[in-house]
Image (cartoon, rainbow, N blue to C red):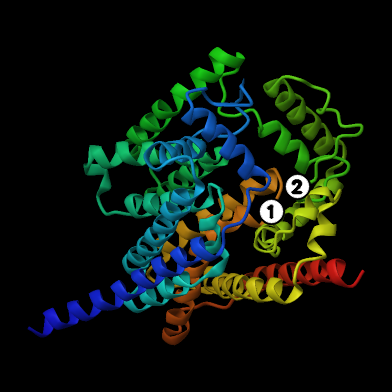
Amino acid sequence: MEHTKINNSLFSRLSFIIVSALLFRLAITIFFAPPLLKDEKDYFAIAQSLYHGNGFSVDGTLTAYRAPFYPAFVAIVFTAFGESVIPVRIIQAFADTLTCIFLFFLCKRFFTTTTAYLAATIYCFFPGNALYVSLLMSEILFTTLVFFVILLYSRRNFEHSLLTKILLGVIFAILTLIRQNAAILLFAFIVWESIRFRYWETVWKRNIIIVFSFMLFLFPWMIRNKVEFNHFSLTSNGGVNFWIGNNQTANGSFKYYKENNPIEKITGEFERSTVGYKEGVDFIIHHPMEEVKLLFLKFAHLFEPDFSLMQSLQYKPEWESYQRSILVYRELSPFILTVLHFFTVVVVITGLWSLIFASDSKYQYLLLLRLIIVFWVCSHLIFFGVARFRLPIMPLFIVMTAYSVEVWKAKLYSVTKPKTIVFLFLIVLLFASWVSTFTILYFQ
């Protein structure tokens, strides 16, 4: 009887968190209904084209510039509920609530129930991710699938289930069809397995079905691009994004100019991408010190205040005519910007502490989370950094923030000189980027 009471109590607490998370996100969809901006317009246009039977195209022209899964997801919602973004926002509210549930069970599996409740509660009301449910962007769906795949992959003896392996491969493929750099996540898991088992034969046996189903699920889209564009590839925007992050005028974030742009005059999508890769590599080879500087800038922009989200929150029609984004950002409320970013600052710093200093019997799980975060950050250091790119790893920082409390109470940490140097270096870099950002915006 006592055991039943305890289980009922735990279930009640979790139910309260889940309901609160859902109501919070549904309230956001009601009170925060911004116009479609930037990438959202592309996703909406492609979804409309699919919905009306005109294929994966924009204005009647076939394209491979955007990854296919998210526009297809939006088109499916249109088919089921009508051509409106409101059902998409509601479904994303449910998806982000599901992320909160996945986060709880992941944290409970890795650490303790107390830590799991704390992590779920923080994510329940964390505005940095929750506000994205009202944007027609892929980050919410992507983050939910990332946590689902972590839960599946970290199951004990998952190698005995053929269905689980196939499902893992399919989900990794879907993630890659949402954001092509997500393929690096599969590599992160395989590296984790390699460190755990140390025998490539064991790792290969555990992952061969996953890799096979992953590739098999990607092939139809790649074959489509081969037929339509004569390029066996996922998207045509990789080279463009690579050039944006690696050229003479690059600032580490999204900065695209048209004058004297070597890729602007190229007409074909994939041809433009090829030139973008070539120009970017050429810049790295001939300007290595500039590239080192850009790496720091990309990292800083990845954890900067989310100006694009703020632009949607405080949208003004006249901003459409502004030639430079910084002119828009200077009209954003510094108070709201600071309050929203404060939560990110606390979570990132506290999460970093346990990521670096935690040292206990849960090392293998800490290693997995570290690898996912490091691999994800590095994938964006190759291209460029903006705030929304960090959304998929923010729940992991929240997990580590909650775990910091457990580590501190039980004294399960190891403070060594190398770890301290790494921690202080990252903190100084982050604070320097945050201070310089606010200084440039509001004091220059």
Horizontally, residue 251 falls left or right of residue 226, namely right
Is residue 278 visible from the viewing direction of this image?
yes
Q: Residues within 10 Å of mark 2 (few under 14, many from 20)?
A: some
Q: Where is residue 26 in the image (x, y as percent from the top left)?
A: 44, 63
Q: What element carries label 2?
A: loop
Q: Where is residue 51 in the image (x, y as percent from the top left)?
A: 47, 31
Horizontally, residue 136 falls left or right of residue 431, namely left
| Frontmost residue, 267 versus 385 | 267
Q: Residues within 10 Å of mark 1 (few under 14, many from 20)?
A: many
Q: Quadrant of the C terminus?
A: bottom right
| Frontmost residue, 183 versus 225 | 225
Q: Image point 73% across, 33% down: which residue?
A: 240
Is residue 256 shown above or below 109?
Answer: above
Measure how far apart labels 1 and 2 are at the Cα level.
7 Å
Is residue 170 shown above or below 377?
Answer: above
Disc nearer the start of the sequence (1/2): 2
Q: Image point 51% across, 23% down: which residue?
A: 55
Q: Residue furthest left?
A: 1
* Image marks 1 and 2: residues in contact by CB distance under 8 Å: yes
Is residue 38 shown above or below 350?
Answer: above
Circle on res. 329: none
| Frontmost residue, 38 versus 414 | 38
Residue matched to label 2: 254
How many labels sit on residues? 2
Q: Position of residue 263 (x, y in %)?
A: 81, 28
Residue matched to label 1: 386
| Frontmost residue, 20 versus 8 | 20
Q: Which amino acid does label 1 sit on?
A: Val
Is residue 195 visible from the viewing direction of this image?
no
Q: Image point 44% across, 44% down: which residue?
A: 190
